[in-house]
Image: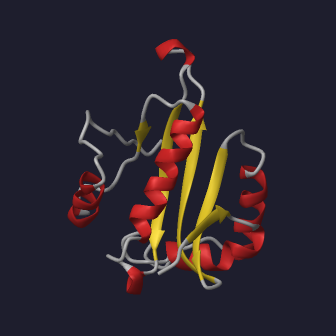
Amino acid sequence: MDIQIRRAEEGDLPQILNLYAQPDMDNGKVLPLDTARKLFNKLKKYPEYTIFVATSKGETVGTFSLLIMDNLVHGGTPSGIVEAVAVVPKYHGIGIGKKMMGFAMDRCREFGCYKLILSTNLRRDKAHRFYESLGFERHGYSFLISP
C-alpha cells in the first residue's frame, strides 16, 4: 500500500474523528465536528504541534499528533511527544503505523530532539509490542491524575 503522510487540514476532521471513535481510542464518544473544528484551528497556533494524516489513494488510513517541545534542560535540546495514534482497523498490521512512527522519528531528528516519547494504556499489549518492535523502550513511569 502506497502511504503518504501530510499535515491534516480542516477537511480531514470527519475522517480523523472516525479514527478516534475506535474502541481502543474514544469508543465512539468523539467531539462534535463543530467543536473539533474550533480546537483544530486553536491547535494550529501552537508552535510545532501538528496533526498528521496518512493517506492512500485519497483515503485517510491513519493519524497521529506530534509536538516538538522546547526545553530548558538538556542544553535546550527539544523533545518530541507523539499522541493520538490511530489506524483504520482493516489496515492494522500492514505497516501504516510503522510508517507514521518512522515519519515522527525523522521529524524529531530534523529538529535535533534528544528523545521521542509516547504513552499508551496499560491494557494495550498489542500496541506495546508494536512500539517495542520499532525500538521504543519502556522507560520510567507515566502518571495520570484527573484534576
Indicate whether 19 appears above or below 100: below
In this rendering, does residue 29 appear at all? no
Indicate whether 87 appears above or below 103: below
Residue 11 spot, x, y in % from top left: 76, 75
Residue 77 spot, x, y in % from top left: 53, 22
Side (left or right) of 61 relative to 44: left
Residue at 43% x, 77% y is 22
Indicate whether 72 appears above or below 113: above
Residue at 65% x, 63% y is 6
Indicate whether 68 appears above or below 26: above
- Count of marks, rendered view: 0
Residue at 45% x, 28% y is 114
Q: Quadrant of residue 8?
A: bottom right
Q: Quadrant of residue 93?
A: bottom left
Residue 60 spot, x, y in % from top left: 59, 78
Residue lying farthest to the front in this orientation:
2
Residue 147 spot, x, y in % from top left: 48, 41
Q: Nearer the viewer, residue 128 or 1?
A: 1
In this rendering, does residue 20 appear at all? yes
| Colouring style | secondary structure
Residue at 47% x, 46% y is 105
